[in-house]
Amino acid sequence: MSDLNEEPVEDQEQVISEQPPPEVVVKIPLFWKLLDDGKVGAAFKLLREAKQRSGDDEDGEAEQPPEDEEGNSSEEPILSFKQLLSLRHPVGGESLILWSTRNNRFLLVEYIMQNGGKNAFGFQDKKNMEIYEKWEEERQRIAQEEEEKRKAIEEGEEPEEEPEEDGDEEKPDFAATTAEELSVSAYKVREIGDVGLYEGEKNESGARHGQGISLFTNGDFYAGSYKDNKREGLGTYRYKNGWFYTGDWVDNKRTGKGRMFYPDGGRYYGDWLNNRKHGSGTFTYPNSDQYIGMWRNDKKEGKGIYKFNKDKSQYEGEWIDNVFSKGLWRLNNDVVYSGDFKNGIPCGVGQFDFVANGIKVEGQFDGGNNWVGGRMSDL
């Protein structure tokens, strides 16, 4: 006789199946926790401190925290600069440069670009990077050989001919020999040699689509959004010549809002169209002069203000083909010119106001320090 208090088997199975799944706890590193909590300044400080510790050593290792008597530690390892740059978010898998780009953290992007070298983009596959660097060495070798041949021809020397191979023996294939050396497929070596490196999301057809990072065969880098193999959305691009841009992309071109940083210290923030400054934008020059105004096809065009850092004077008015043509020239608080310009100086009809002296000079200016005709009167 069965126990009336005993639960039916099927009810026991139902109770078991209704048990909640075990909770998965993902440990978030301190650096990423600061960013997740909006404490970007504190995370930026950790990054700068790591760079100071690493110095010029790009491969610096993490410093281990102090341990107790049993060899345990409750603290995280102190990560090196390189490790922080390559540290992915444990939940979304996002790299630091992708996060900084997506959140428009321009100062953080600038710091990473200027100090990170190849580590700035946080590539994870070391083997693929090794293949890429082999290709770099091969291209440099070929370029050097071509340069030596060119110089020999210029100096009237006969270039050295390639030695003939014995029999039917073929010249060693770079991809095949590299594949054997690194224990990878020759297809992988050729693929990286043709298109560079990519780590990120792809669509069903295998095209770059979504968030990803790229290292191109010419040495340029990109981190950001792709759509069907084209840069589309927010992205950061570092050019081999030292320029880097972070902002909007449309159909593989800088279009929308974005910032460009130049190696000489100049920088631009504003509107872009088809890779050109176009619309409203601000350009800060290496000497701290600044232009704020309209652009057309990479040139100042329309209304704008140019501030001279050295003497604090400024132009305010109309620009044509990168040249100030008409408006105000505020030399200082006491002297203001309004009128026509040529080559950056008063030329044509205009007026000087000498505020301190309470007089004005109206007339035709000859492009020098002289005025023709006109009159002088009180303000």
Image (cartoon, rainbow, N blue to C red):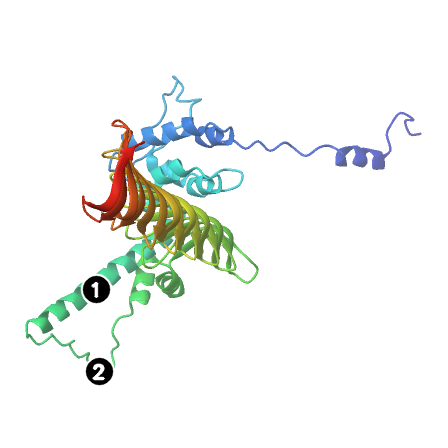
Which residue is farthest top? 69
Lower sequence index among marks 2 and 1 = 1
The tag on residue 350 is none
In the image shown, does 16 or 99 lie closer to the viewer?
Answer: 99
Q: Is residue 2 visible?
A: yes
Q: Which residue is mark 1?
A: 143
In the displayed structure, would residue 265 be above or below residue 42?
A: below
Q: Relative to residue 276, is residue 331 drawn left or right?
A: left
In the image shown, does 275 or 38 lie closer to the viewer?
Answer: 275
Residue 345 position, x and y percent, is: 24, 46
Q: How far apart, in angstroms, are the residues tagged by discs 2 and 1?
A: 29 Å
Q: Identify the element where label 1 is drawn.
A: helix
Residue at position x 33%, y 56% from top? 132
Badge 2 crowding class, 10 Å Cα cut-off, few under 14, some 14 to 19, many 20 or more, is few
Residue 315 position, x and y percent, is: 31, 41
Q: Which residue is mark 2?
A: 167
Residue 83 position, x and y percent, is: 37, 37
Numbered circles on residues, count: 2
In the image shown, does 267 or 226 lie closer to the viewer?
Answer: 267
User: Which quarter of the rendering shows the N terminus?
Assistant: top right
Q: Amino acid at mark 2?
A: Gly
Which residue is farthest right? 1
In the displayed structure, would residue 362 be above or below residue 191?
A: above
Q: Is residue 345 visible?
A: no
Q: Amino acid at mark 1?
A: Ala
Which residue is farthest left? 156
